[in-house]
Image (cartoon, helix red, strand yellow):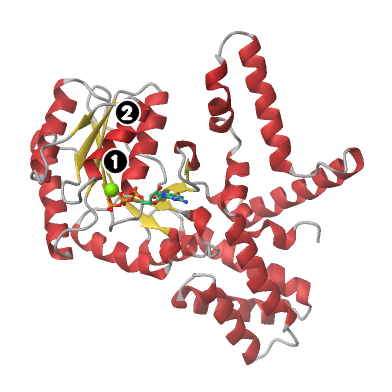
Amino acid sequence: MGLFDIFKKKSDEETSDQAVQQEDQPAQADKSVENAAAQQAATDNASAAGTKDKANQSEAASETADNQAIYDQGLSQSRQGFADRFNKFLSNFRSVDEDFFEQLEDTLIGADLGFELAIQISNQVREAVKVKNIKDKDQIRDLIIEQMVSQYDQQGQGEDQSMHFAPAGQPTVVLFVGVNGVGKTTTVGKLASSYKKEGKKVLLAAADTFRAGAVKQLQEWGDRADVPVVAGPEKADPASVVYTAVAKAKDENFDVLFVDTAGRLQNNVNLMQELSKINRVVQKVLPDAPQEVLLVLDATTGQNALQQAKLFQQSSEVTGIVLTKMDGTAKGGIVFAIRDSLHLPVKWIGFGEKATDLRPFSAEDFVYGMFKDLVVNK
Ligand SMILES: Nc1nc2c(ncn2[C@@H]2O[C@H](COP(=O)(O)OP(=O)(O)OP(=O)(O)O)[C@@H](O)[C@H]2O)c(=O)[nH]1
Ligand SMILES: [Mg+2]
């Protein structure tokens, strides 16, 4: 089943769910409320059975929270922003003429899909309108969403969203790279916490020795997650910190080593050279590592994030993207642009500052969280 069919199915299910709920309890039609309550009840049961203590309760509830509810919440600004733009565009609709396609392109560019993708989708809509002889506003709305989702689906064929691990018994090394302020350290901290909870033996390396305070920030995350952090003296050579950390991970049988790197050096050339050096040092100790080089991008920086990605792709073997601060943008189109122009899988998506706000990326949950308001109850 294609992504658009899955989206339609989910929308239909939600519509009928809401109809039932409105009959039963008119004041409580919100699905996220229902989910949170159901999860709280489940945790309560576990607690009553003596399997969880009270302190863990709310954490466990948010941890097991249905992915879709978290996506819905985290994408609320983007969903609203897209719906506003789109509805405004449709309210101007008179006929399918050149003006219509121009406005469609502007709407898609405004939502952060990028120029090339906007033109491509507009051309596909142009073809489909002709073939299907579509004139009616509702049909046009559905057709545009369908084209966006199908294009996204097709472009993602062969993309591997899963995290890659070393064979059992060897440490997995993951490097986190990206410009300053995008959320690298926070992401390392969040993942340290979730892998530790899964029972993995996690080690962190503070290879951002350039920015004052960076090491301390990682150590705080390490303390919170209860995992050790390898750090050098102030202004230490990052590669030497990484060497120590990789050797420790190997000697002491750690499952995963997350390396936090600097986002800013004197200039970008230095930054890229530093990353290559770190990579070489890792491979000296573990020739098959790093298993992942994750590029962290800030969703609120829009098309700028794509430029950054191209820079990093030239000098390191980026294996995937962590897209942070999705909760802070009203333009979710960046996810479409990343797939279309970079062909790198988004592996994680960040919806906030808490450890549990970082979720494995799900295209289904994303597409639904983005567009559901535009089709539900129609
Ligand atoms: N709202 C929101 N804030 C986030 C998210 N991820 C990170 N942040 C915030 O973004 C800010 C920067 O995060 P850092 O992790 O320090 O970024 P960094 O890439 O390590 O920055 P440098 O070390 O300066 O290169 C912090 O205030 C984080 O709390 C997210 O998904 N949502
Ligand atoms: Mg940092």
| 276 or 129: nearer the viewer | 276
Return the residue nearer the eye: 155 or 184.
184
The answer to whether one can see residue 146 in this image is: no
Circle 1 sits in a helix, a strand or a loop, which is it? helix
Q: Residue 203, can we see it?
A: yes
The quarter of the picture where residue 353 lies is top left
Which residue occupies the extreme right position in the image? 23
Res 267 quadrant in image? bottom left
- The amino acid type, in three-letter code, at marker 1 is Gln
The residue that appears at 34% across and 52% down in the rendered structure is 296
How far across and how far down the image is residue 363, in percent? 53, 51
Q: Is residue 172 above or below residue 235?
A: above
First in sequence: mark 1 vs mark 2: 1
| Residue drawn where x is 61% and y is 14% of the image | 47
Crowding around mark 2 (Cα neighbors within 10 Å: few <14, some 14 to 19, many 20+) is few
Q: Is residue 190 above or below residue 153?
A: above
Rendered residue at 62%/55% (across/down): 76
Image position, residue 197 (x, y; %)? 42, 24
Q: Which mark is residue 217?
A: 1
Q: Quadrant of the C terminus?
A: bottom right
* Residue, disc 2: 223
Nearer to us in this view, 142 or 224? 224
Image location of residue 224, percent across then percent down: 37, 29
Left or right: 376 in relation to 308: right
Q: Is residue 109 left or right of residue 159?
A: right
Say which quarter of the image contains residue 308. Answer: bottom left
Tell me if the residue at label 1 has its CB under 8 Å from ligand 1.
Answer: yes
Estimate the spatial distance between the alpha carbons at disc 1 and disc 2, rounded to whole Å: 10 Å
**Amino acid marked by disc 2:** Asp
